[in-house]
Amino acid sequence: MILSPQKLTLEQWDGHWDLLARQGLLRPEHCGPLSRHVSDGDTRLLALRFDNSPAALQLWNLLLTEQDRLWQWKEGGKRLVGTMKDLGTVPVMAYSLDDLVAFYPDGAWWTPCVMEMNQQLLQIADSLGIDESFCPVRAMLGAFVNRNHFPIPDLLICSVGATCDDFSAIAQRLNGLGFPILWWEIPHRRPPEPWEEAVQIGNGLVAPASLVSLVRNELDRVRSALSALAGTDLDDLKLQAAISRANQVRSLLASLNRLAFTATLSPLPALEVLIAQMLAIHFCSDLGKTVDVLRALLAQAKQRVDAGLGYGRPDDVRIFWVNPPADIKVMNLVEDYGGRICGTDFMFTHALDPIDLDLPPMDALARIALADPMVGPVCDRARRIAAEIQRFGCEAVVVCRIPGASHCATEGSLIAQYLRQTCELPVVEVEVPSLVDTTVHVFENRIKALIETAKARRRG
Amino acid sequence: MTSADVIYNCPFVPAEWIKAHGLRPVRLNPRPSWGMHILGQIEGICPYALAFANHAAACDAGLVVFTTRCDQMRRVYELWKVCTGRPAFLLNLPTCRQSAAAQRFYIDELLRLGRYMEQFGGRRPTKPILAQIMLQANQDLETPVSPNRGAVPVAILGGPLMNTDMVLFDTLASGGAYVVFDGTQGGTRCIHRPFDRRELCEDPLQELALAYLDIPDVFFRPNDGLYRWLKAQIDDTAVRGLILHHYIWCDKWKAECWRIRQWLPIPTVVLSNDGQTGLDSPGIRNRLSAFLEAIR
């Protein structure tokens, strides 16, 4: 049975859930209605609208039960690895070992949004001198202090070097508060000099072999720490197996993105596409369930596309979105204003690219780590965005700014400048705070102006 | 300025390495941008990073060296390339300095800088030439200033100062204070330790790199070295108060302010610098005056 796509409020979803249950369309993996998470404090859900498919329900439940899952893993004897900043590489290593579960404490950056500030995480960070001049990832500090959001990991691993100053500074503060951290170096990715050996690191990028070698050595230190934590050797065979499973996730997401961005009508709302992409970085602490959820979403999307069903109108303006929004509600809003997200760079494109299985696993992981868009020159990132814009036929670009983020001011402007010149598209930069409500009119005006401009260009 | 000048600001760019290539190191102490924006005015950029780039762009030097010591400077380098099209070099610095791989990485980066300088008239140095320049540098290392009897001993710590901010020292002196150690980027904290004579005879470049990596700085992870240095300074002096300086948008120094204040046994005052108003504003003078009065 194909459900006609419809965005539902949380209240509507409850009624819809009863209906689906009566029709026998729900299975145990769909858990319960989403509204139960509101009582846990996830009050932002009340302001969102959700896709009405069981697959989307499964996706949201996977996301919103992560905290419970982490506690369960811990109580069940698994060792928790808090991996920070690298967004996608170290978890692949951790999930090579059965006794380890990796997650990103950085994910707490969305907590002020999802829980609408009611956990006071930002206030805790304020009290520790990490005020609003820092990126909302400062909420992570609050989460470590109040210990309400995730179990304290048995091992903390953080990549530093060519990373945001905010994150590096906050992680150092965390370290100063008594949380030991294994730091590993991710150097700035520069182009190879003419005299240097150059290697392909994926997606058309090249890097000096010496940098790949450095990162491989650094990841070897991580490998040793993971082996010691698990009490078993993390060998290449185990790594190969984990890379294969990670590639399965990446492949499913690539298919999902392709459908979402290229079908005449979008088979999934932008919000669900964003959440699905997030699964790539640490599999929401459950690789198996992540694969199940993505398969279900992909099947749902295919069904809708085949049936000619989807969201929006064919003439909605096709927008490329750069950087993750601190308030996920804006994904709903863009569609309300007549936009359609047809391409994204949420700062972890390297976690979506396939990892080369033909290389020795540590070499492959080093290359994918170096392909992180945030460690390389802005022009590399902008070039990739331009290529995706062309591939998906985008007509406008939103460069989303993260309040206080050290990279955004310069990087956002350079990306915007590059895309205006290269793609000759209208581009707007817009800052999205953790709760957009108080500045929603600014957001609305800027997005609508962008959409009107793009439509005017169609008329030539 | 001449084409043989190499402009830089970061203490991890070894002047001796530039000199050994026959070029002239010019460590720029930039002036505030004050509306003169070759690189444009962008909200959210560190004012110091922008001031350095703007000032360097106004100079007629052969080469400008940026480093990856902070995200802001790394990205201002990219802005420089787009806006000026002039030659510049981005020196990749290791953040986890304790590992041998990081040390090797830094040496490789210095060699890469050397090859780049050769394109601008530099000559590849021999070991004896580098060693000789390093020995000379040992002799040039500053000797501590004698205490000023009767004045209040204070210390300064934090990010770099712009040239107009040097007025801070006058303000302190006129307020009856004496700076026992300067832990800003231009001060004693960022001067490398003396080079080891035996080591520099064997492998001068390695000794150069290790000496520079020993500079205690806020950007290293972990940055315990900075705290060890600070403790040693405090133990060695009779310092009564610390002036902690950071630019707005400088996350690395700003994030440490709270920890330093908690950790230090002496009173601390934090000066947040917007890079425009400077450290000579009535507000800052008044703040310093009250601080000095309180610790006298």
Image (cartoon, coloured by chain):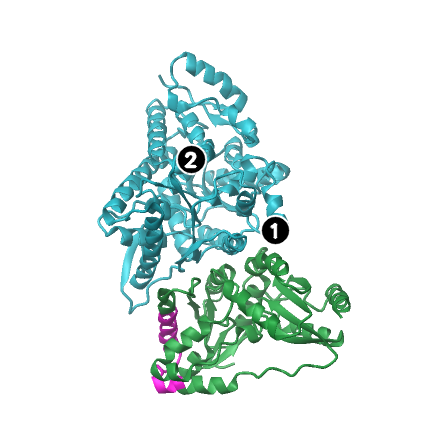
Chain colours: A cyan, B green
Is A422 placed above or below B21 here?
above
Picture coordinates of residue B20, whole percent (x, y): 41, 83
Q: Residue at x 54, y 43 (%)?
A: A143
Q: Is residue B126 visible?
A: no
The answer to whether the residues at label 1 and label 2 have Cβ atoms under 8 Å apart is: no
The residue indicated by pointer 1 is: A128
Which chain contains the residue that carries disc 1? Answer: A
Picture coordinates of residue B105, whole percent (x, y): 36, 67
Q: In this view, does B57 lie to the left or right of B245?
A: left
Is B101 placed above or below A134 here?
below
Q: Does the magenta stretch include residue B116?
A: yes
Secondary element under disc 2, as helix, strand or loop, is helix
Q: Main secondary structure of the magenta part?
A: helix
**Most foreground residue, A398 or A255:** A255
The region drawn magenta spans B106-131
Q: In which quarter of the image is residue A197?
A: bottom left
Residue kind at label 1, given as amino acid type: Leu
Picture coordinates of residue B134, whole percent (x, y): 43, 84
Q: Can residue B179 be seen in this view?
A: yes
Residue kind at label 2, given as amino acid type: Glu
In three-dimensional space, the C-alpha distance between marks 1 and 2, rounded to whole angstroms, equals: 30 Å
The residue indicated by pointer 2 is: A75
Do the residues indicated by labels 1 and 2 lie within the same chain of the protein?
Answer: yes
Which comes sooner in the sequence, label 1 or label 2? 2
Label 2 CA crowd tier, 10 Å (few <14, some 14–19, many 20+): few
Is A343 placed above or below A405 here?
above
Picture coordinates of residue B162, whole percent (x, y): 61, 70
Q: In this view, does B75 lie to the left or right of A28?
A: right
